[in-house]
């Protein structure tokens, strides 16, 4: 195999870490020295070999560990995977897209053989070897969305399109940044985005919805989103707030480089062929501050972004308790030099 999968955890001892070779491929979300909400959507075409943008669905060294963590979350809370009855076809669309993409992009890890409706799927990293009838859920061990959702990194919402809006009618969500599928299921685009400050006033969501409603099949798009989190914990759901909320009290100037993680979401948007629904994968990447600052450009820029972040965003993203000490800690990596455009390290 070309990828060495890590044995690590996103809970308990928090043994998660990025290997030195994995750090430069991190999707650093800031193309310039300041940040404000924007639609920032671009075509999801292959870009830069070795980056998270090279393939349709990125697979990296954390794949097996993330899938084990997903299984733990679903065992504790099956409500993290829900699909309304009319989303069955969309689930099969999702399964097909992932299997075809992964078999094409990672032939040493995944193999798909199609004989009419009879499909044979091999997932070597997870030791899965299944034959099933496409379109017949009784030939899979669970709903097609859950079956493939347990084999692809990132959360996945599936949005039904009707009445000039998008509706969150299905999803497998186990690594979310403080939002709840159980609460949002059945909501429309503006309802589930209601808590976000400033963006409504700036017209960001109106423009985003207009774009998504006309998203064509075969032309996926992507954007990056970000927040910070304490410890490399994937599951920061409202349901488990008592487990992760108190972590904010543990941050000190001495441990902030180890504790605080930049949490980046690579969000992509895919029009599905049979259901006309939109698949919305949210792939989360985590990187400790100590790892971020190994790239001088990133350390320098992150200080400026955090220093000048609007108070409303500091509050909304839950950074208030440790934001001042983070800015002070990052300042040691800012020598005042100019930074180059774009997100990739120099």
Image (tube, rainbow, N blue to C red):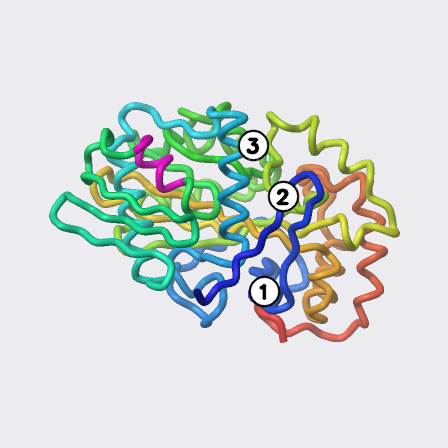
What is the secondary structure assignment of the residue under circle 1? loop
| Pointer 1 or 3: first along the chain | 1
Q: Which mark is residue 10?
A: 2
Screen quadrant of the C terminus: bottom right
| Pointer 2 or 3: first along the chain | 2
Residue 53: x, y in percent?
A: 45, 62
Q: Which mark is residue 136?
A: none
Q: Are circles 1 and 2 on residues that touch, CB within 8 Å?
A: no
Indicate the quadrant where residue 194 lies.
Answer: top right
Check disc 1: other Cα within 10 Å, few if <14, some if 14-19, many if 20+: few
Q: Which mark is residue 179?
A: 3
Q: Report the magenta residues as a range.
A: 141-149
Q: CA distance from mark 2 to mark 3?
A: 18 Å
Overall secondary structure of the magenta section: helix
Q: Nearer the viewer, residue 104 or 68?
A: 68
Residue beneath label 1, please? 22
Left or right of 236: which side holds 71? left
The residue at 23%/48% (across/down) is 120
Screen quadrant of the N terminus: bottom left
Left or right of 260: which side holds 155? left
Residue 203: x, y in percent?
A: 50, 43
Q: CA distance from mark 1 to mark 2?
A: 17 Å
Indicate the quadrant where residue 288 lies.
Answer: bottom right
What is the secondary structure assignment of the residue under circle 2? loop
Left or right of 4: which side holds 116? left
| Pointer 1 or 2: first along the chain | 2
Q: Are circles 1 and 3 on residues that touch, CB within 8 Å?
A: no
Is residue 143 shown in magenta? yes
What is the secondary structure assignment of the residue under circle 3? loop
């Amino acid at each position: 195999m070309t990828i060495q999968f890590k044995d690590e955890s996103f809970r308990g001892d928090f043994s998660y870490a990025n290997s030195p070779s994995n750090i430069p491929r991190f999707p650093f979300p800031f193309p310039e020295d300041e940040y404000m909400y924007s639609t920032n959507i671009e075509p999801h075409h292959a870009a830069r070999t070795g980056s998270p943008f090279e393939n349709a669905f990125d697979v990296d060294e954390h794949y097996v560990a993330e899938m084990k963590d997903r299984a733990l979350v679903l065992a504790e809370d099956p409500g993290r995977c829900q699909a309304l009855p009319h989303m069955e076809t969309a689930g099969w669309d999702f399964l097909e897209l992932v299997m075809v993409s992964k078999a094409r992009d990672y032939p040493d890890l995944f193999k798909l053989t199609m004989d009419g409706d009879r499909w044979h799927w091999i997932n070597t990293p997870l030791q899965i070897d299944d034959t099933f009838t496409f379109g017949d859920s009784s030939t899979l061990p669970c709903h097609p969305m859950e079956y493939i959702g347990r084999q692809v990194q990132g959360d996945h919402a599936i949005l039904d399109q009707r009445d000039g809006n998008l509706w969150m009618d299905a999803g497998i969500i186990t690594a979310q940044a403080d939002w709840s599928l159980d609460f949002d299921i059945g909501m429309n685009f503006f309802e589930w985005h209601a808590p976000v400050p400033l963006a409504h006033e700036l017209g960001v969501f109106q423009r985003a919805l207009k774009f998504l409603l006309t998203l064509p099949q075969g032309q996926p798009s992507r954007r990056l989103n970000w927040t910070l989190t304490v410890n490399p914990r994937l599951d920061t759901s409202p349901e488990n707030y008592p487990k992760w909320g108190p972590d904010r009290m543990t941050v000190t100037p001495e441990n902030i480089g180890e504790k605080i993680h930049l949490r980046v979401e690579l969000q992509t948007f895919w029009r599905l062929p049979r259901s006309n629904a939109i698949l919305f994968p949210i792939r989360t990447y985590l990187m400790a501050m100590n790892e971020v600052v190994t790239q001088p450009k990133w350390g320098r820029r992150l200080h400026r972004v955090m220093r000048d972040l609007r108070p409303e965003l500091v509050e909304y993203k839950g950074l208030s308790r440790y934001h001042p000490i983070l800015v002070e800690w990052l300042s040691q990596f800012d020598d005042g030099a100019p930074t180059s455009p774009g997100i990739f390290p120099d």
